[in-house]
Amino acid sequence: MNAITLDSVVPCVFSGRAGLESDVWGRVVTFEKGTNVLIEAASGAGKSSLCSFLLGYRNDYEGRICFGGSDVRPLGIAAWAEIRKNELSCIYQELRLFPELTARENVALKNSLTRLKEAKEIDAWFERLGIADKRDVPVGRMSFGQQQRVAAVRALVQPFDFLLADEPVSHLDDANAAVLADIMAEEAARRGAGLIVTSVGRQLPLKYDRVLHL
């Protein structure tokens, strides 16, 4: 997947709303592989909807979303599963970790699907993010910030052309946010992938090619 294009996409809930000012909704916007884009949003602007549209969890929108030039609306469950396994990864705002599993197990479960990463590389990320001592702790017993770092590692152990990071540093201090930004930038550069980052406040400290206001 070389590009994601939103062509006049508007959430159905916003349909007919007068004075909708956005760099994304109702416009033609293309996210290209190999570029970093920040999407800034105010509360209620539809950030969660946008993420769900791009990941194929919802289709209650007008307009078209195209992956590599092909409209995604006709795709079925199996096709979306393959896309989310090999082409599109996500650091979810709500994390979606298994609380009863350890940090190591949560990451290993995702890595087992493609066996993309070796254990030593995953361990190095845990070390850099300051959670190496939490690898064998159930994530339900970890702070939200620690869980957020586990979720980031999990998103990085699969193949992707685009990584969607939904408020990835909302509970991280500046030091850990900077480390996460470095790891994400390194991995995206290694794969030639694109990063799409959302923010309603604190931003992942990356060098962005574009900043869009939702």
Image (cartoon, helix red, strand yellow):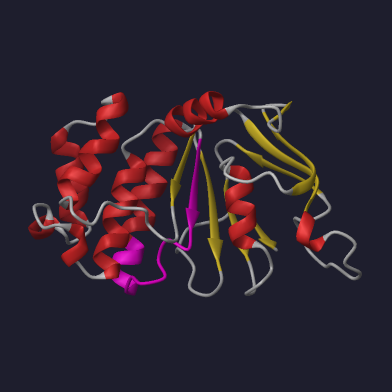
5 relative to 63 in the view: left or right: left
Q: How many marks?
A: 0
Q: In which image quadrant can residue 176 be found?
A: bottom left
Residue at the (23%, 46%) spot, across then down = 106
Image height of 135 relative to 190, above or below: below
Q: Find residue 70 and report its horizontal and vertical position in percent.
A: 72, 25
4 or 209, which is in the foreground? 4
Q: Find residue 122 and report its horizontal and vertical position in percent.
A: 20, 41
Q: What residue range appears in magenta?
A: 162-178
194 or 11, which is in the foreground? 11
37 or 71, which is in the foreground? 71
Q: Find residue 147 and report its horizontal and vertical position in percent.
A: 27, 61
* Quarter of the image with the C terminus in it: bottom right
* Quarter of the image with the N terminus in it: top right
37 or 98, which is in the foreground? 98
Q: Find residue 136 and report its horizontal and vertical position in percent.
A: 8, 52
Residue 209 is at least partly visible in this image: no
Residue 137 is at least partly visible in this image: yes
Residue at the (45%, 60%) spot, across then down = 93
The answer to whether residue 171 is magenta is yes
Residue at the (30%, 53%) spot, across then down = 97
198 relative to 142 in the view: left or right: right
Q: In which image quadrant can residue 2 be found?
A: top right
The answer to whether residue 200 is magenta is no
Image height of 96 relative to 87, above or below: below
133 relative to 25 in the view: left or right: left
Residue at the (56%, 55%) spot, across then down = 208
191 relative to 101 in the view: left or right: right
